[in-house]
Image: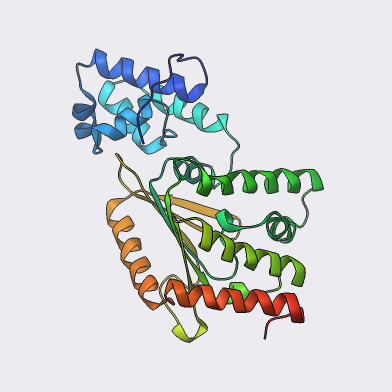
């Protein structure tokens, strides 16, 4: 996550926040490392705020105000910077997703967003946004498709996905959509060397991450982060203890899942069943 500082502090509220943080830090005679020590984070983390790479955090902004004696100045700028983008529970994680060097995800009942086809994404969105206009649905689908390009970009992260077998059998959008979606999983597995897909079989039984979607993100020059999601809610976790706990849970799930080769065979078989029989038994 290289810190490429915006040259124009007025380019957007986030850039202005970073410019003000840098100004106040310099006036206080602190290096990024020095400020990080006092604010209980790393110097590189401070640099990412100053370079407008990370979305400002309210709790950390409160610490900055306490350190600099600036009342609620940084807290107000933080709220402004966070309102600049669409207010949505996934926004922070989506920003970090583009900067990650590796992403490890797991889900139980649906194919993960970065792996979805357009038809599958539309079917999921229509189901979860039942009372939303078609215009909004299409905007969300376009955003999902834009995200999926990350896996093929020049700076693509190593991407490890664990998909529960249930996701191969739930008829999202109908047989044609499911057949296309599972064929896409096969193609991605075969053509993108940075992508590894495992299937968690029904036979594996219960595991700690069974009822949630979890995304673990690692970066070149910043602490790892975890994003968890449920219905209409999501949470970005950066606390080192909780991140380490999620990593251990993910490692255990990965050990219980089928091997990549066995997973590919199961996905191919499921895709064939959807295509030829219109269902999966």
| Residue at 42% over, 40% down | 99
Left or right side of 30 for 48: right
Q: Does any portion of residue 59 appear in the rendered image?
A: yes
Compared with 4, 173 (above or below) is below
> 81 and 147: which one is in front?
147
Quarter-of-image position of residue 122:
bottom right
**What residue do we see at 48% from left, 86% from top?**
203
Question: Could you say where residue 137 lies in the image, as x and y percent from the top left?
Answer: 74, 48
- Tally the marks: 0
Name the quadrant of the C terminus: bottom right
> 47 and 75: which one is in front?
47
The one of 154 and 5 positioned closer to us in this rendering = 154
Q: Residue furthest right?
A: 134
In the current view of this chain or complex, which residue is farthest to the front?
Answer: 191
Residue 128, above or below 145: below
Quarter residue 66 falls in = top left
The reply to whether residue 72 is in sight is: no
- In x, y percent, where is residue 54? 41, 34
Residue depicted at x 33% and y 56% = 243
Q: Position of residue 67 (x, y in %)?
A: 25, 26
Residue 238, position in %: x, y?
A: 35, 48
Q: How is the image coloured?
A: rainbow
Q: Camera-side residue: 76 or 171?
A: 171
Eyeballing the image, is 187 above or below 26? below
Q: Is residue 277 left or right of residue 224?
A: right
Image quadrant for the N terminus?
Answer: top left
């Amino acid at each position: 996550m290289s810190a490429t500082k915006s040259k124009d502090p007025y380019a957007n509220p986030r850039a202005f926040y970073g410019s003000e943080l840098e100004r106040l830090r310099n006036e206080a005679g602190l290096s990024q490392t020095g400020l990080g020590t006092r604010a209980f984070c790393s110097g590189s983390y401070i640099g990412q705020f100053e370079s407008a790479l990370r979305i400002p955090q309210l709790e950390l902004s409160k610490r900055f105000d306490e350190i600099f004696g600036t009342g609620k100045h940084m807290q107000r700028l933080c709220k402004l910077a966070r309102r600049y983008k669409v207010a949505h529970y996934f926004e922070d994680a989506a920003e970090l997703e583009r900067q990650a060097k590796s992403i490890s995800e797991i889900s139980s009942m649906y194919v993960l967003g970065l792996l979805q086809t357009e038809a599958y994404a539309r079917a999921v969105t229509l189901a979860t946004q039942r009372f939303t206009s078609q215009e909004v649905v299409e905007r969300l689908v376009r955003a999902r498709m834009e995200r999926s390009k990350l896996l093929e970009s020049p700076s693509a992260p190593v991407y490890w996905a664990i998909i529960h077998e249930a996701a191969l059998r739930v008829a999202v959008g109908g047989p044609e959509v499911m057949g296309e979606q599972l064929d896409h999983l096969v193609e991605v597995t075969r053509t993108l060397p940075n992508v590894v897909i495992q299937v968690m079989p029904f036979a594996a039984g219960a595991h700690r991450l069974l009822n949630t979607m979890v995304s673990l993100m690692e970066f070149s020059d910043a602490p790892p982060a975890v994003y968890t999601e449920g219905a209409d809610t999501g949470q970005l976790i950066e606390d080192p203890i909780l991140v380490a706990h999620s990593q251990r849970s993910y490692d255990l799930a990965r050990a219980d899942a089928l091997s990549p080769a066995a997973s590919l065979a199961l996905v191919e078989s499921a895709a064939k069943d959807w295509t030829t029989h219109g269902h999966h038994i």
